[in-house]
Amino acid sequence: MPSNPALDPVSAVAALGDASRRAVYEWVLAAHREVGRDDVAGALGMVRGTAAFHLDRLAKEGLLVVSYRRLSGRSGPGSGRPTKMYARAEDEIAVSLPARQYDLAGDLLAAAIEDSIETGRPVADSLKRVAAAAGQEIQSNAEGQEPARSLEDVLKNYGYEPVVQDDGSIVLWNCPFHSLARKHTDTVCGLNVALLGSITEASSGDRQGRKAVLDPAPGRCCVRITPASGAAN
């Protein structure tokens, strides 16, 4: 499945720069269960309102997940309001500068191996298929948002650092799979062109007939988005 870039990992990590908030986060992780504001306040000697502030900030950044339940175990009238509870989030948050998408590459490579085992296709063919399917899903999700995201917005969100040229082509100044591409160039660049080709073709807002082509050059992504009638330079 394509990774979700909706949460800002830099902001999430920055939230832990506050020593008190980091202590709250580490205590919740060590608890290995859902905890409430009173639990955190009592354990760390905080005012309840301060504990609530830090817990809600951590939840906002995607570092904790929130649920509600009645601690008394009762239900119905007179049972009281549900208590807001917090627990560690299952999703990992990692920061890399420039932006990288190694989790996405790992998902696609694993899915390709599984598809190859199940169907008997060569792994390279399976990789193109799963990468293309992922690209369609990424663009579909982007266009389902309000407002719908443009092709350039999607590429930016996934760390490609797109720059539109005068002829309508797009140069991608960052490779989200940089380290993998250096070691396994043919495999990763094949994955990349299939993924970006599918994203581009699925973009209903693209009226220039652009397509993804391999156009490797030092210091940037191996793929360029170019008008169908044009050629890579």
Image (cartoon, helix red, strand yellow):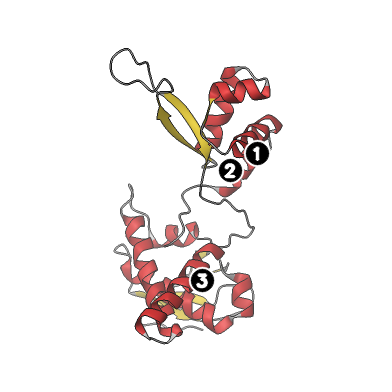
What's the distance in space between the residues labelled 3 and 1, CA to CA? 35 Å
Name the residue furthest top.
78
Q: Which residue is mark 3?
A: 171
In the image: residue 105, left or right of residue 137 = right
Question: Residue 32: x and y, percent?
Answer: 57, 39
Task: Name the mark nearer the viewer: 2 or 3.
Answer: 2
The quarter holding residue 225 reads bottom left
Evaluate whether residue 29 shows in this view.
yes
Note whether 146 is above or below 73 in the view shown: below
Q: Amino acid at mark 1?
A: Leu
Question: Which secondary structure, mark 1?
Answer: loop
Q: Residue at x 35, y 20 (%)?
A: 74
Note whether 95 is above or below 12 in the view shown: below
The foreground one among 56 and 167 is 56
Question: Residue 95: x and y, percent?
Answer: 62, 53
What's the distance in space between the residues labelled 1 and 2, CA to CA? 7 Å
Q: Which residue is mark 1?
A: 16
Mark 3 touches mark 1? (CB < 8 Å): no
In the image: residue 177, left or right of residue 84 = right
Q: Which residue is mark 2?
A: 12
Q: Amino acid at mark 3?
A: Val
Q: Amino acid at mark 2?
A: Ala
Question: Which secondary structure, mark 3?
Answer: strand
